[in-house]
Image (cartoon, grey):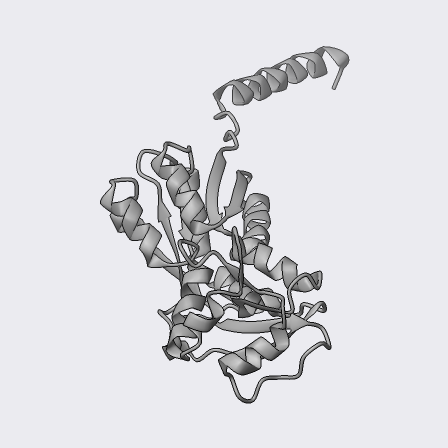
Amino acid sequence: MGNRDVQPAATALAIILLSAAVLAPPPARAERVLVFAAASLNAPLTEIARAHERKSGNRVRISFAASSALARQIDNGAPADLYVSANMVWINWLEARGKIVKTSKANLAGNRLVMIAPKGSVPAMENFSGPNLMRILKDQRLAIADPGHVPAGIYARQALRALGTWRQMSRHLAPSVNVRAALALVERGAAPLGIVYASDAFNNEAVDVIFRFQRASHMPIQYIAAAVAGHGGRAAGDFLSELTGERSKQVFKKYNFSRD
């Protein structure tokens, strides 16, 4: 074959390739998803989000704070696509205000409530009582998420009431903006005791779990996800499906969340 035969063939091939490039659909544009989530979900949601980003090509940004604070921000117009609460109270509150897509609600995981102390400072409590707690506290305070509106604090108040110690302990509290802040007080030794979720204390080398509250002593601890009305799109729906999938269940289990 001579050069005169090769040149037309090459030209034809170039035309075919150019036509294919023109007709091919443009690559899908990455979308962004903004998630408002309870502070105690930091570790599992971050892992799930990074894996989802690699798989989908979309960007997932998560804002962690107290469920109550996030719910109020959504009510005031914050552009969250998904909301993940540490209890049903704030989900129901937003739903009543028309801010949640009712049919999107999904239960992701559960948790337990525990009392912690700085590592090696206090033995496990065999007899839970107000006087025993006061002996440990001395003139210091019990670290707790704000019992007025933060889910972890609400659960803690319910548990202490069930055990008959709330009235006494309520005068010796160090309320925090969220459960992670309460945990930090105990980790630093700024508080001799704290009440947090079991997942917060899991594999935490700075604290010991000295008491586990019975599930019956407080409302069930549930993490519920829902789509925010008027926000999000296909990417948000895909990530919500990811959160309810089997792989995500294994991630929650890895970080000591229950499957309640």
Towards the viewer: 252 or 244: 252
- Quarter of the picture containing the N terminus is top right
Tell me what residue is drawn at x 41 percent, y 62 percent: 154
- As drawn, the residue found furthest toward the bottom would be 126
Tell me if residue 32 can be seen: yes
> In the picture provided, is 100 more to the left or to the right than 118?
left
Towards the viewer: 248 or 190: 190
Tell me what residue is drawn at x 38 percent, y 69 percent: 158
> In the picture provided, is 126 more to the left or to the right than 156?
right
- As drawn, the residue found furthest toward the top would be 4
Residue 214, image quadrant: bottom left
The location of residue 179, given as percent across then percent down, is 53, 58
Towards the viewer: 123 or 16: 123
Vertical arrangement, residue 251 with respect to residue 32, above or below: below
- Quarter of the picture containing the C terminus is bottom left
Residue 7, image quadrant: top right
> In the picture provided, is 101 more to the left or to the right than 192?
left
- As drawn, the residue found furthest toward the front would be 139
Vertical arrangement, residue 175 with respect to residue 229, above or below: below
Tell me if residue 238 can be seen: no
The location of residue 190, given as percent across then percent down, is 68, 61
The location of residue 224, given as percent across then percent down, is 38, 56
The location of residue 122, given as percent across then percent down, is 67, 79
Q: How many marks?
A: 0
